[in-house]
Amino acid sequence: MADRFHTTSAQFQNRWGTSLSALAAEEDVAERLEGIARHFGFRGYLLITVPSETSTDFSSSVLLTSWPDEMLKTYDHAGLIFGSPVVERLRQSTNPFVYDADGTNRRRIDGKAAIAADLFERHGLSRGAYFPAHNSAGLRGALAFGGTREALQPREMAELNALANQIFTEVVERRSGHGPSVSLSRREIECLSWASAGKTSVEMSEILGLSEYTVNHYLNRATRKLDAVNRVQAVAKAIRAGLLN
């Protein structure tokens, strides 16, 4: 699969690893992760802090993910965090590794191997890789990608491993209050910009290639974040805050 893309490691870093701190909101980081997943032929991504040995659920350790909510709820309802070979490996090692839902879960000793393997197979995340990460304060986490493609090649593993610390650190710092002060996402800013130009939601949906519902969702969320009563006031506040040109 690596041959599909014909990119050097430097080109890869320039495309995906640079300017992470310039992204306006977590939603933009999530979009970046979705783009990386697609680039490598994966279906989804997962960014977590490594669950402690006293953790009783997996969801509370999730920072960002494209895993379906139903999958996370089923995972926790079945208590799959207990005895998870992947979680145990993340607690003990800082080396990246690949996983296979069927083969990896055979190492479970809780009798739930078939339940775990079926869950990942059902959601199209049967194979993938985990990349351990940490920030300067020593908090440990991991970035993972899953899908049904064949195992990553060494070069692909190295490229994704190089991104893990960057992305993990960026998200953790944002949540601790040390990230960028701008609170609007790229999409929210785009919609407000077009609103300031007098475009309707229908017109914006055509320009941005989004549904009218999605455009209104971004505008409503931006309006709430700016503590405005309507989109006109939201535009005015965004301009005063320097968020719009």
Image (spheres, grey):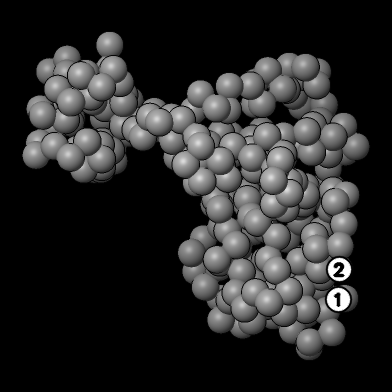
x and y percentages locating residue 78 in the rendered image: 61, 82
Check disc 1 and report its element: helix, strand or loop. Answer: loop
- Residue at image position (18%, 26%) is 237
Q: Are marks 2 and 1 in contact (CB under 8 Å)?
A: yes
- Residue at image position (81%, 68%) is 88
Which residue lies most toward the front here? 137
Check disc 2 and report its element: helix, strand or loop. Answer: helix
Quarter in which the N terminus is drawn: top right
- Pointer 2: residues within 10 angstroms few (<14), some, or many (20+)? few
- Residue at image position (51%, 37%) is 178
Closer to us: 51 or 13:
51
The reply to whether residue 209 is visible in this rendering is no
The reply to whether residue 72 is visible in this rendering is yes
Which residue lies most toward the bottom here? 111
Closer to us: 180 or 189:
180
- Residue at image position (55%, 27%) is 21
Quadrant in which residue 55 is drawn: bottom right
Which residue lies most toward the right here? 154
Q: Which mark is residue 43?
A: none
x and y percentages locating residue 184 in the rendered image: 34, 33
Would you name the residue on which mark 2 appears?
103
Residue type pointed to by label 1: Arg
Q: Is residue 69 above or below residue 5?
A: below
x and y percentages locating residue 75 in the rendered image: 60, 74
Residue type pointed to by label 2: Gly
Would you name the residue on which mark 1 appears?
106
